[in-house]
Structures are given as structure tokens and as C-alpha cells.
Amino acid sequence: MKSFCANPCIMAKGEGIYLTDIDGKRYVDGISGIYVVNIGHANAEVIEAIRKQHEKLAFVAPMHALADTAVEYAAKLCEITPGELNTHFLLSGGSEATETAMKFTRQYHRQSGNHAKYKFIGLYKGFHGATLGAMSASGIGGTRKSIFGPFLEGFYHIAPPTCFRCPYGQEYPACNCLCAQQLEYAIQSHGPESVAGFIIEPIGNTGGIVTPPPEYFPMIRDICTKYNVLLIFDEVITGMGRTGNWFAAQTFGVEPDLLAMGKGMSCGYAPLANCAIRNSLYYSAFWGEDEANIHFNHGHTYGANPISAAVGLAVIEIIKRDNLLANGQKVGDHIRQRLQKEVAQLGILGEVRGKGCLIGIEFVEDMDSKRPFPIERMFGKRVEKRLMQEGLILRCNPEWIAFGPPLITTIAQADEMVDVFLKCLADELGKSK
């Protein structure tokens, strides 16, 4: 905060893929806010949908009733969510969505006769939100988590599928996806009778856009089914078109039991999130007479908000009409191809990862040995400062940098981003030598 206040970046306007600060400097929003603004800034159709809904109805208390717009939106979600994930719990933020998925999981097992099932397994380097339950499920290290402890009981972690630097010292594909097999080992170790759920981002953001091999999720799905462990996909980032399909569950061809989503649902125009639940789970354990008191005893003030629902409806229509799933895939493929070739030419490419319009680049000091840059060099963060000076906003960590441009981005605009990025990389390398 001290360094930010010394030279604050304060935005005044957004249009398409661009932002303008209060001094008139223009930036390319190469990360869609933070994987949020999939349809770009200042979309007139969404703004008009908000205006019309405000004139009609702005708020309904979810403990008493539902707005017709929220019902219409839930029905529209059923058209795009995979498989049987057609029970929707509308919320206002990603952390609420992951918390909802975990609370549902515990209540489901309790009402299904599995009273001892309360534990969750997640991934090291995974991130599921800023609330205490979501932080407990997160496997990140450092001050983003540690200073808020102690955390909730019953949360454990296994290593992520980071093939580039396998935590088990294996090489893909000879490893037979040992990282997926570790889930079964963890369930057995903690006791199958006590493990309720496995929560995972299909592509791990905080770990460096960690993208699993194709065998990983089918193996995970089978293990969860075998031990009656609910599989929770945290698609707050990967959902709503980011990976080339509506959801990464479709990209990887595996249907979870619960799917948390947010960010791109409203593209930043209103707070909106959702927990999609398998119909069979809901109706087998939560559907009954009032006196049974088995309903999902959970809710938030702004759940199923009509303004947010109106935005969500407009966003789905725009993505469908303008074929933005395909465009995002095309733009993402183009960026990956350029980075694969041109970062390698600079001699610092470790790996390019991702799906659709979610792209990560890991840097190495030596490409032959995969030796990383010394952590104290903070290479990626130093590049970030140069990127901001040149007017390009990306997601930057010391060892890796991510692109996540809006799905409306053109190939020419993608080239604009990559050109600036490569210039800043070369400048930082030259400065360091």
C-alpha cells in the first residue's frame, strides 16, 4: 500500500479491451481485470439491461421470494452448464461460491447417512477465495494465507499436476499420472469414511496456470466416485468461456458434482456468482416437507439479485451471438504460438501453458537445465513494472506471467499485447546483463 500510494494507478474509463487512467494514459487490459471482463469494458447492451432492470425491480429478499429475472437466468444457465449440473445457487462472489460448495457437501453427506464425512482435500498452490473457509481449502503459502491462521479443521492438500516441475521427480507420460493417484492415497490415509470432497481449479491460477495432462481428470473423477467423495470444480476463473468452452469441465471432458463459478458470469458489470449442483444430489438429500427441515440452510443477502441476473442474461446472449467462445480459443492459440516461438528465442522459455484465452509463461534462466531465475531476482515482477510503464496489464509472479485477454480481443490486438510483452522482456534481460 505504501508503494502504491507513492505512485497510484487510478483508472477513469474503460472501453473494449482498453483502460484509461485519470492522467489520460491508455492501458491494454491483457488480463480482463482479473479474468473477469470477458466481453470488454463499457458494453452498451449490458448497461441498457441494467437500466431496464433497475426500472422494473432492483432487489428481492431471497428468504421470501425470487425475482422473475433470476428464475429466467437460472433456466438459461441450465442450457450451458455440463451434464446434470442444473440446480443453481446464485450468489454475488467467487468466495461465496466455493464456500457454498463446501457447505453443501458437508450437509449432503450428513443428510445421506455419512455423518463422519467432513474433510476436504485440495491442491498445494490452489486458491479458492478470501473468506476463512475458502482460505482453509487453499494450498497457497506465504503471507496470503499464513497470517490469517489458524484455519478450519479438516482441510488437507496434495501436490498439483505440475508436469514441468513434477513434485515426484517423474517424467510424463511414464509417470502414469502419479499426481492423480496421490488423491486415492490421501483418501485412504485420512480415512474414506471421513473425506467429504475434493476441491480443485481445473487450471490452477496461483500455481502458474497449471494445466493437467489429459489423463488427470478422468482418473480424479473415478477416484472420487469410488470413495463417494464429491468432486468440486472451482471455475471462478476458468468458467464462462475462458478455456474455449463455457466451462473447463467441458474442455477436459469430466463432469464434477459441484461447479463454483463467478467473475466472467457478469463480466464485471455487477456482483454475480453461482454454485451449480448435480440434480441427483439435491433431490436425494435436500428435497422434503417443511417439517423434515432438510433444505440447504444457507444464503446471502444479494443472492439471486435481479440486477445481477439481468446482467448475466445479457452476457450469455452476447457470448453466444458474437461467437466469443471460438474467438477466445483462436486468440489464445495465436498468443501461445507466438510466445512459444519468440520467448524461446530470448533464451528464457520454460513452458507455455493454458487452454483457450488463459495463457501462462514460465521463465527459466537456462532452458537446457530448466534452472529457474533466482527468486531474489523477482524477474516476473520486474517485468511487470516495465509492462505498466508501456501500458500493458498482465498477471505477474516472480517465475511466471499470465495473459487472460477479453474474449472480444482481435488478432491484431493480441499482437499488440505480445509485441509490448516481448519488448519488455528483452529490455529487462538487457538491463540485467
Image (cartoon, rainbow, N blue to C red):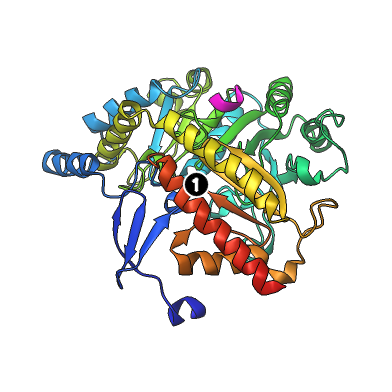
Magenta-drawn stretch, dominant element (helix, strand or loop): helix
- Rendering quarter of residue 190: top right
Residue 355 percent location from the top left of the image: 57, 35
Is 156 on the left-hand or right-hand side of 2?
right
Residue 122 percent location from the top left of the image: 68, 42
Q: Quadrant of the C terminus?
A: bottom right
Secondary structure beneath disc 1? Answer: loop
Look at the image and tell me whether residue 370 can be seen.
Answer: yes
355 or 368: nearer the eye? Answer: 368
Number of marks drawn: 1
Q: Name the residue located 51 percent from the left edge and 54 percent from the top edge.
A: 419
Looking at the image, residue 421 lies above or below residue 16: below
Badge 1 amino acid? Gly
Looking at the image, residue 270 lies above or below residue 286: below
- Rendering quarter of residue 75: top left
269 or 297: nearer the eye? Answer: 269
107 or 136: nearer the eye? Answer: 136
Q: Name the residue located 71 percent from the left edge and 27 percent from the top edge.
A: 220
Looking at the image, residue 149 lies above or below residue 133: below
Residue 166 percent location from the top left of the image: 81, 43
Residue topped by disc 1: 404
Is 330 on the left-hand or right-hand side of 168?
left
Look at the image and tell me whether residue 381 can be seen.
Answer: no
137 or 298: nearer the eye? Answer: 137
Q: In this picture, which residue range is highlighted in magenta? A: 250-254
Q: Name the residue located 35 percent from the left edge and 55 percent from the top edge.
A: 18
Q: Which residue is outermost to the front?
A: 345
Residue 224 percent location from the top left of the image: 70, 26
Looking at the image, residue 366 lies above or below residue 356: below
